[in-house]
Amino acid sequence: MKGMGSAAGNRLDELFDARDDYDIVVRVIREEDIVVARQMAKQMAQDAGFSLADTTKVATAVSELARNIYRYAREGKIFMRKTEEQGVSAIEIKAVDKGPGIEDIDLVLTKGYSTFERSLGIGLSGVKRLMDDFEIVSYVGKGTVVFLKMRSRKI
Amino acid sequence: MIRARVVPTIILFGCMLVPIQIELDDATVESLQNQILDEIHKNDKIKAVIIDVSMLDIIDSYMSYTLSETAAMARLMGCRTIVCGIRPAVALTLAQMGVPLSEGIEVARDLEHALLLVGAPFLRG
């Protein structure tokens, strides 16, 4: 999904300052916050009864998003919450920044594409492959929001 | 120049063992890379580097990138690098993301297997 147009910028402000019912908010300002974010995600996935494999996926996905925020936008926030749908627990994550935005979302989701020199260019496309739901909304010059959702798998 | 060692290493039979037992943030990963190259440079007995990641419960794309890059750098200095002990959940996550960690780097099941691969003399019986 490509969100362009300036009127939509207000929605980004709303998302950035959202004080809705997310359980945890991690502000990503320093590089060490990447570790904090992924540890919080891991803890939440464990609390939600996720398997070790799914916990690792969620924590890794959050690590990638936090790094993207730090690298490209300098700062942002990661919101996390536990939900439940028909008795299945799930985790929803929203990563928001007011960075430069993404001009061509399809391009950044191409494996191997990166504008950062020390990178595999796998972060976002990898996150998309790990999660059940994945959506990016980006406004060039205003910022980017990434939504993730992962449902617990009962084995 | 004195640089703090990020991970205490053990050198035996020309192998440098690097057991990672701390949570690695990006700066620490970079320091570890510097440390490994520094130690290779200072000790010409080192012919192989074995990085044990069995304590790491998360390895993301940047850590993978830096590990592969470190292996490439060590190779240029004449050293083999083997990563061992990748956990099942980490393997699953990396494979699903499409991170090609095992392409540029040798992997082993555990420390013992890694030592066997480099032909550590005490294991030859």
Image (cartoon, rainbow, N blue to C red):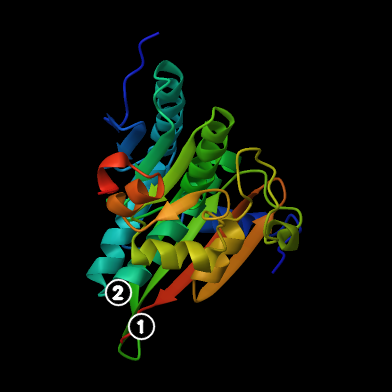
Measure how far apart labels 1 and 2 are at the Cα level.
7 Å
Is residue B35 at least partly visible in the picture?
yes
At mark 1, the secondary structure is loop
| Residue at screen point 46% across, 60% down | A61
SS at mark 2?
Answer: loop
Residue at 62% over, 56% down: A10
**Tag 1–tag 2 contact (CB < 8 Å):** yes
- Return the x and y of residue B6 as percentages of the image width and height: 32, 29
Of labels 1 and 2, earlier in sequence is 2
Q: Dot 1: few (<14), some (14–19), or many (≥20) neighbours within 10 Å? A: few
Image quarter for residue A83? bottom left
* Above or below for A98 versus A125: above
| Residue A19 visible in the picture | no
List the single residue furthest toward the bottom: A86
At label 1, which amino acid type do we have?
A: Arg
Q: What residue did someone put label 2 on?
A: A51
Label 1: chain letter: A
